[in-house]
Image: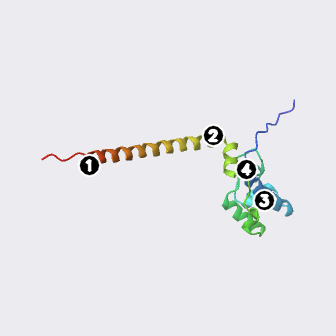
């Protein structure tokens, strides 16, 4: 009986995919395997393989990219497009990670509610102060 391989939705954004392809391109051009690069970065031997998979959350950090640039003797900017991407990568990320999106939306609702309550309190105090000033003082 053959084992089924489960393939989920792509969890990486356009900019993350761009970076992954640049690292892979360098790796292959220099005949460096995933295991070797993982070891050079002082990471688990499967890290680069997981980072290159489209369905995992493993990503290269800025620190990783800096070390990869040094290892392959390329400028740090090699890993980034010459101009910004048209895609809204933050919205793309939130759409690909519904739990993160839900936490973000909850945080924004809480912040809006807190702001509304502060505005109402300021308005209430302003009205109280105006009411006190309107009343004449008794002697």
Regarding mark 2 in the picture, which secondary structure is present there? Answer: helix
**Splitting the image into 4 quarters, where does residue 22 fall?**
bottom right
Residue 93: percent from left, percent from top: 68, 47
3 and 1 marks in contact (CB < 8 Å)? no
Q: Circle 2: is it few (<14), some (14-19), or many (20+) Cα within 10 Å?
A: few
Mark number displayed over residue 99: 2
The residue that label 1 is drawn on is 133
Residue 1: percent from left, percent from top: 87, 29
Q: Earlier in the sequence, mark 3 or mark 1?
A: 3
Residue 116: percent from left, percent from top: 46, 43
Q: Is residue 126 above or below residue 41?
A: above
1 and 2 marks in contact (CB < 8 Å)? no
2 and 4 marks in contact (CB < 8 Å)? no
The residue that label 4 is drawn on is 13
- Tell me what residue is drawn at x 46 percent, y 46 percent: 115
What separation in Å lies between label 1 and label 4 (alpha carbons)? 58 Å
The residue that label 3 is drawn on is 23
Q: Earlier in the sequence, mark 1 or mark 2?
A: 2
Viewer-side label of 3, 4 = 4
Residue nearer the viewer, 98 or 65 = 98
**Left of 137 or right of it: where is 9?**
right
């Amino acid at each position: 009986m053959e084992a089924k391989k489960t393939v989920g939705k792509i969890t990486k954004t356009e900019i993350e995919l761009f970076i992954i392809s640049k690292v892979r391109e360098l790796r292959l051009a220099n005949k460096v395997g995933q295991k070797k690069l993982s070891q050079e970065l002082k990471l688990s031997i499967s890290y680069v393989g997981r980072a290159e998979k489209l369905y995992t959350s493993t990503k290269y950090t800025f620190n990783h990219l800096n070390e990869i640039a040094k290892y392959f003797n390329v400028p740090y900017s090699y890993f980034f497009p010459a101009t910004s991407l048209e895609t809204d990568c933050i919205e793309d990320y939130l759409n690909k990670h519904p739990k993160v999106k839900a936490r973000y939306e909850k945080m924004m609702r809480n912040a809006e509610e807190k702001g509304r309550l502060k505005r109402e309190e300021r308005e209430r105090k302003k009205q109280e102060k105006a009411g006190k000033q309107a009343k004449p003082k008794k002697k």
